[in-house]
Image (cartoon, grey):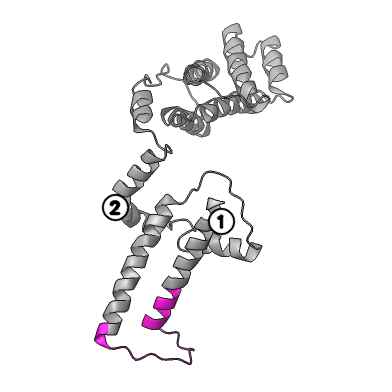
Amino acid sequence: MTIYKEDEDLLQLISELINIQDKLEPDNNSKIKLVLSIDERKKLEDQWDELFRKSNTTKIELDRIRIRETPHHKAIVDFFRMSPVHGPVKQENFNDFWENHYEEILDFHTDNELLERGTFISNYYKLIPPYVKVGTAIPEGIKNIYHESRWCFVYGQYNATVAMSRTIIETVLKIKYRLSGDLNDIIETAKERSLISSKTKLNAHRVRILANKILHRAESISEKEAKDAIDYTLIFLEEIYL
């Protein structure tokens, strides 16, 4: 499989970087102390720079989304997870990494359909700002999840949009009204106790039914269904918290 070849290439790259580093800056405990001429050092530094650039490109092109199988022992997998190439970019280094490589990052993600710029722009401008009436006291945590559901829509992650919308509906009803059980029963109980209106009940069920396509039948959600879900959820939140 190609993925195994990718692993082997990365191991080789890391090995070469470590080898050059050891020659340029030998460990204090090392028994071998190389005396390098100016030309030899310059050559090694050039090799290091080239390999380092290659490692950054590899870091950008590494698939961090799809589940991957590997025949390697756990020790090798753990090494990958901690290595400069496989491991996450440290927060303190991320701004520099982005500044130096943002064009390469965006081009790679676009070329490999991890980011579709047309979808991003198109979906962003399909949204109306999520207005609610003055006095609608939506908790900050719920607001944050709702905002994230809208960003999922912008990025074309429609299944995630609906799944997060369902999470909002269920979480709000459980926490605000201290209800328990499956979502269908919670919605019905809330209506029976006159805690929500018929409209709120309808909107909650609409989101639940859309989410069931994903959660129970592994069916994908359409753009329209995702847009409907965030719209229903906003109306739901306004009615609950106004």
Left or right: 49, with 239 as reference point: left
Tag 1: amino acid: Tyr
The front one of 205 and 29 is 29
Q: In the image, residue 85 lies at what x, y percent?
A: 45, 60
- What residue do we see at 34% from left, 62% from top? 53
Furthest-top residue in view?
A: 198
Q: Amino acid at mark 2?
A: Glu
Image vertical order of residue 192 relative to residue 168, above or below: above
Residue 163 higher or lower than 54, as above or below: above
Place of residue 17 in the rendered image (x, y in percent of width and height, measured from the top left): 42, 71
Image point 58% across, 18% down: which residue?
Answer: 207
Name the residue beneath numbered marker 1: 4
Mark nearer the N terminus (2 vs 1): 1
Residue 99 disc label: 2
User: Depth-wise, is mark 2 or mark 1 nearer the camera?
Assistant: 1
Tell me if I can see residue 67 in this picture: yes
User: Does the rendering let one see residue 25?
Assistant: no
Q: Which residues are magenta?
A: 18-39
Of the numbered discs in the image, which one, if any, rests on residue 48?
Answer: none
Q: To which quarter of the image does residue 70 belong?
A: bottom right
Residue 112 point in image, percent of width and height: 41, 40
